[in-house]
Every structure is written in structure tokens, then in C-alpha cells.
């Protein structure tokens, strides 16, 4: 049996560009792709924290160190500059792969910078 699990997440990434006249995708700083383990052209899910929009596209590699998060093509209608996104990649894992499985999580700061990384999502009790 295989399970679909969260592979990687960029939490509260700041949209820096929103380009309607482009064929599609989401450009992400290449350093962040490497840290998250997301490959160029890999399918990603985007969840807009500000307006609740959820959509699917693929990652393209942005310039390393640029802090770019560019939502392109039709998806530009769903996320604008200055909005916050949760960007997730999922993968199929076998039971054996899940024994020590942890996703790669990048937490983004208020100015669009990388704040810190983790391999676990903190549990917050009310």
C-alpha cells in the first residue's frame, strides 16, 4: 500500500509577482526549491491565506537568492502581489518509506525572507 503524504511546504510565502500574460506556473526562488526538495516542473498545490483560493500548478525555478514567488498565467487571478500562500508538494510513499518520514517545511517571515526550516508541523492547542 502507498500513502499520499505532504512532501514539502513553504508556509506563508509572500507573492512578489503576479503575471497574467504568461503561460502558467509558479516561479519560486531556486534556493527555496532546493531546501524544500521540490523539483522544477513538479506539481504543487497553492493555498491563498488571504482570500481562500486553492489551485494547482507546477513549480519553475526562479533565480537563487531572489526571494521570488511569482504566480503566473490564469493563476494570477487567484493570487496577487503582497498576498500570502501556503505552497505544498505531495508524493506517494510506501509503508517502508514512511517509517522515518518527515516533510520539509520552510517558514517564511513578514518581509518574504526565509525565517526557519523544520521537519514537523507544531501542534497548537486552543
Image: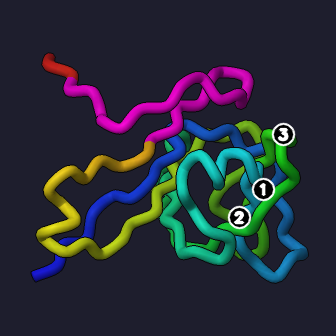
Q: Is residue 125 left or right of residue 70?
A: left
Q: Position of residue 24 (x, y in %)?
A: 75, 77
Reply above or below: 70 against 15.
Answer: below
The residue beneath circle 2 is: 26
Report the Cα–Cα distance between label 3 and label 1: 14 Å
Q: Earlier in the sequence, mark 3 or mark 1?
A: 3
Reply above or below: 66 against 115.
Answer: below
Q: Earlier in the sequence, mark 2 or mark 3?
A: 2
Report the Cα–Cα distance between label 2 and label 1: 5 Å
Contact between labelled residues 1 and 2, with CB atoms less than 8 Å apart: yes
The residue closer to the viewer here, 76 or 114, is 114
State the SS at label 2: strand
Contact between labelled residues 3 and 2, with CB atoms less than 8 Å apart: no
The residue beneath circle 3 is: 65
Q: Residues within 10 Å of mark 3 (few under 14, many from 20)?
A: few
Q: Position of residue 55 (x, y in %)?
A: 52, 68
Q: Position of residue 123 (x, y in %)?
A: 20, 27
How many numbered badges does the structure rendering display? 3
Which of the image's four quarters has the C terminus? top left
Q: Residue at x 71, y 30 (%)?
A: 112
User: What is the residue that sits farthest to the top in this orientation?
Assistant: 126
Q: Position of residue 23 (x, y in %)?
A: 82, 82
The magenta segment: 105-123
Contact between labelled residues 1 and 3, with CB atoms less than 8 Å apart: no
State the SS at label 3: loop
Q: Residue at x 65, y 54 (%)?
A: 33
Residue 120 forms part of the magenta stretch: yes
**Residue 48 in view, yes or no:** no
State the SS at label 1: strand
Amino acid at each position: 500500500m502507498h500513502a499520499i503524504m505532504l512532501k514539502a511546504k513553504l508556509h506563508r510565502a509572500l507573492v512578489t509577482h503576479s503575471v497574467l500574460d504568461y503561460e502558467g506556473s509558479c516561479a519560486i526562488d531556486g534556493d527555496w526549491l532546493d531546501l524544500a526538495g521540490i523539483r522544477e516542473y513538479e506539481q504543487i498545490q497553492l493555498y491563498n491565506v488571504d482570500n481562500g483560493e486553492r489551485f494547482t500548478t507546477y513549480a519553475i525555478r526562479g533565480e537563487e537568492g531572489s526571494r521570488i514567488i511569482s504566480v503566473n498565467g490564469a493563476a494570477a487571478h487567484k493570487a496577487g502581489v503582497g498576498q500570502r500562500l501556503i505552497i505544498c508538494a505531495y508524493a506517494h510513499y510506501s509503508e517502508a518509506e514512511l517509517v522515518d518520514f518527515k516533510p520539509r517545511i520552510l517558514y517564511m517571515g513578514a518581509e518574504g525572507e526565509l525565517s526557519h526550516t523544520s521537519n514537523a508541523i507544531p501542534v497548537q492547542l486552543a
